[in-house]
Image (tube, rainbow, N blue to C red):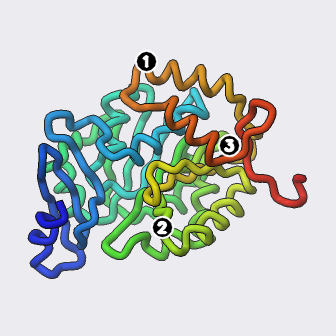
Amino acid sequence: MFRIAKHLMKRGNSDAVDVSETNGVRALHLGSPTIQSAMRIRDPNALELTYTRGMMCFLLFNQHIKDVLAIGLGGGSLAKYMHAYCPEVIGTVVEINPNIIQVARNQFFVPENDARLQVIEGDGLQYLADHAKGADVLLIDAFDSNGIPPDFCSQDFFDLCARSLKNAGIFAINLWGSDRNFDIYLQRIEHSFQQKVLILRTGRPGNIVVFGFNAVYKHFNIAQLQARAKLLESTHRIEFNQFLKQLMEDNIVQHNQLQFKRDDHDA
């Protein structure tokens, strides 16, 4: 895969939107050989990359999700999956690069806009500022050739994300565990969401999904999460039980409850 992607990058355009293909998997690259999105051609609605399946774990925590907002389209994996397998969800994706939208539709089979999916060309930051308390779930997966754009990892940004969610809203962001600034980003997310944060490692030392929860959430009963995971696995092609075990390993478990990190004044 690296060899194919490197060949595609010979144009020298750091803003290039490139597509490579190997072993039946099509991949999206944004100005570097790094795979930003992947799709198995014979199964285009499946979530090929583990971290994308991990991000869908928001379904474990809230059974009444309707409005899902995503900033950044990439190959549209999450948007396609929810459109195909979550009929109750209305998805909105904001993508600033029209070339990505074109490639996602032409090469990754992202469906045209309809009543349940809207792909909007626009500035995600501005959209968040204009739509306070508008989403049940906010998904952030915004990488470019240099990693996470600076505007998408500041304290102001995470504060904006928290304000964009409804009272029972859930925030999920894909981060690199090997990023030297990971702890800084995590602390900022904890500040924005008042320490109500869970992490989910989906590869070592690779992608880590960080979930932030609004104040209405206190903790999660393990038995209820296990029952929910079992139910979800009957209708989804996602290993929810395995992810739940990883959540229990990565976070605090006490008295059969999955708990958030507590700061000093909550002790």
Q: Is residue 9 above or below residue 124?
A: below
Amino acid at pointer 3: Asn
Looking at the rendered image, the disc whose residue lies closer to the viewer, 2 or 3, is: 2
Relative image position of residue 58 (x, y in whole percent): 54, 39
Instruction: Return the x and y of residue 229 as percentages of the image width and height.
Output: 53, 25
Point out the tag, 3 or 1, that comes first from the N-terminus.
3
Query: Residue 117 at what x, y percent from top left?
Result: 34, 39
Q: Quadrant of residue 2?
A: bottom left
Left or right of residue 26, residue 171 in this image: right
Label 1 Cα crowd, 10 Å radius (few <14 / some 14-19 / many 20+) = few
Q: Amino acid at mark 2?
A: Ser
List the residue tagged with mark 2. Answer: 178
Q: Are marks 3 and 1 in contact (CB under 8 Å)?
A: no
Residue 133 in view, yes or no? no
Between marks 3 and 1 in the image, the one whose residue lies nearer the viewer: 1
Horizontal arrangement in the rendering, residue 38 relative to residue 122 (left or right): left
Q: Secondary structure at mark 3?
A: strand
Q: Is residue 25 left or right of residue 190?
A: left
Pointer 2 and pointer 3: residues touching (CB < 8 Å)? no
**Tag 1: amino acid:** Ser
Tag in front: 2 or 1: 2
Distance from the alpha carbon under mark 3 to that under mark 1? 29 Å
Q: Tag 2's secondary structure?
A: loop
Q: What mark, if any, has residue 167 been given in the picture?
A: 3
- The residue that label 1 is drawn on is 234
Compared to residue 11, the image places residue 240 above or below, namely above
Which of the two discs, 2 and 1, labels the residue nearer the N terminus? 2
Q: Tell me what residue is drawn at x 60 percent, y 24 percent.
A: 226
